Image: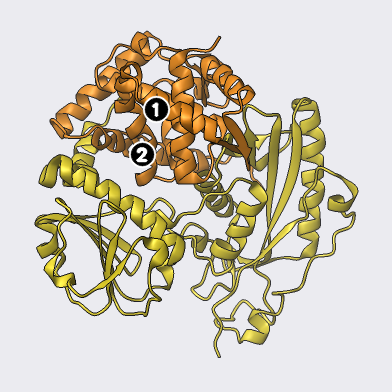
Chain colours: A orange, B yellow
Amino acid sequence: MSSAFAVFDYLFIVNSLGERLGSAAGGEVHLFAYLACLLSLLDGQPSAEWGYAFSGLEMGSPFSADLYESAEELERLGMLRPVNAGFLLTDSGTERLIQLESLEFFRPRLKYLVPSCQSLLAFPVGMIRNAMSMEPGLRPVIRAGGSRPLLGETTLEQLHEYREALTRALGKTADLLVPATVWLKYLSDKAAQNDAAKMSLTLVPTT
Amino acid sequence: MIDHDKMNALASQFYFPLIDRQHGKLGVDALRQILGFIQQFYLHVAPETRTSRILVFKHLNDLPTNVLSGAHEAQSVHHMPALSQEPIVMQIFENGRMLLSQSVSVSPEGLAQDGVVYIYQNRIETIHAKNEYTTLPNPLIGYASMFAIPTFDDLKTALHEYKTKQARKCSCLILADVWSDDNRLLFRSAPEKIMRNSLTQFLKHTLRGNVEVRPEQIVNATRPVDIKVTWFMTNRLALIEIKWIGASKGKKGKLTKRFDGRAREGAKQLADYLDANVVQAPVHESRGYLVVLDGRRGGLKTSTKQLNPANGLKYESKEIAYSPEFHKKRNDFEVPFRMFIEPICTL
């Protein structure tokens, strides 16, 4: 049985990404759900409040078993339909999302799901994926390889430092999309620096 | 370790904090609407084809501006009139309606007092609020606007886009660095690393889905493959090998010429990588992509500074004969991509 939060998040993200990108690939749903979870932590919410956990996959991508189960359940119920390499909501999926969105129970999550998906207004999806590879949870997964649970104690401490740094630099902002985009831009620049450093190191001459 | 100076610089220069600082919540909402609109607008109008300014304005309280009274009104971006090359001024509204004029002259500063203004001109984008403005960063410089960067579901389509939009006229600024001269006649010494960086950056930004793009990945004991693309949550992966043909100029001026045989060597190398990868990643469904950047020119000597079109484009349509034809013999080998890079020719 998948978590109610994961079902709601899956529907919401597929709908938002569908509007912007034409469809939502499974991995993208996990990525934007994880970004929403991180935004809640940067906003001072405790990690346990999110409602389901994430792991880092070997390639450095976030993954949630609850989201995965939700996708299977929603597909079985005919609420998702495959499009290209991803999904869109069917009419019954859209109806279910509207129904769930009206419930008070899910409303606090919108504060984080909305800016997570709206970060696509500011950056191409590839850039967001690249930026997220530098956030404190996924970075060690990429460095060490192998899957591992995300949001351990060290990661939470580092996220807290980011929270303080963002607050110090930006002061009080009117909208969470402001620190969200600044943070993603910061991580994206770090990723570009990291790529440039890696690319200048030639392992073996490629002739 | 957080770089606080960098964070502070972003806080003062990045466009989201600028709008928040000047206009608060209403401004950020207006900015959201402008960004959504621009992405739609550029699906209809390619920014690189515009020789004059594009200005988009959203009033904080959705009030129409006087300077656009009498402007063309459209229900959405799908209902725009045909556009001339004159500057474009557009005001957008909450309900998707828009006013468009190609005859009025407006001051961005004036409009920005009560709203958010976006301007595109000569491949530079700026955002204005009150008396402040900032230039938008563009992560993929080969594209005129960061809001017009396409995304691709599959690698083959992305490679076709790279071939036509980035490689053909060397629009990618990273790739532009492979030449030793301004007319794109001779590659510089050892240009392959630059080529790999260019294609890696392009794929990282444009490929979407459950995908990871990494340069220089080890697949056998002797050499790394140039780029490895892995689709997680599935068992698919792609190996990309890049080769160049044409002539390169060494540091002491010596020419090194590489002909079709070099592309055939690349095909053999890629076939070997695919075989080795079966051992390394037995559960993966791997596919090989050979990318040949073609800088062949006719009548080229060390002293050549310019070429006429007959010589410059001599190899434009000259395909490479592969033997063996791995792309026909193996079902894991894509048809090679020959990407001809045009020189700048004299008439």
| Circle 1: residue type | Leu
| Number of residues whose C-alpha sits closer than 10 Å to that of mark 1, classed few (under 14), some (14–19) or many (20 or more) | many
| Residue A37 falls in image quadrant | top left
Secondary structure, mark 2, is: helix
Q: Residue at x 36, y 76 (%)?
A: B51
| Number of residues whose C-alpha sits closer than 10 Å to that of mark 2, classed few (under 14), some (14–19) or many (20 or more) | many
Label 1, label 2: how far apart the Cα atoms are: 10 Å
In this view, B304 is above or below B148: below
Q: Residue at x 80, y 65 (%)?
A: B320
Q: Is residue B184 visible?
A: yes
Secondary structure, mark 1, is: helix
B257 or A127: which is nearer to us?
A127
The reply, left or right, for residue B32 in relation to residue B321 is left
Relative image position of residue B203 (x, y in whole percent): 55, 47
Q: Which mark is residue A35?
A: 1
In this view, B201 is above or below A150: below
The reply, left or right, for residue B285 in relation to residue A198 is right
Q: Residue at x 41, y 35 (%)?
A: A131
A115 or B267: which is nearer to us?
A115
| Circle 2: residue type | Ser
In this view, B337 is above or below B151: below
Disc 1 chain ID: A
Disc 2 chain ID: A
Is label 1 in contact with label 2 (beta carbons under 8 Å)? yes
Q: Which mark is residue A111?
A: none
Relative image position of residue B103 (x, y in whole percent): 24, 80
- The disc, 1 or 2, on the residue closer to the chain's N-terminal end is 1
Q: Which mark is residue A119?
A: 2
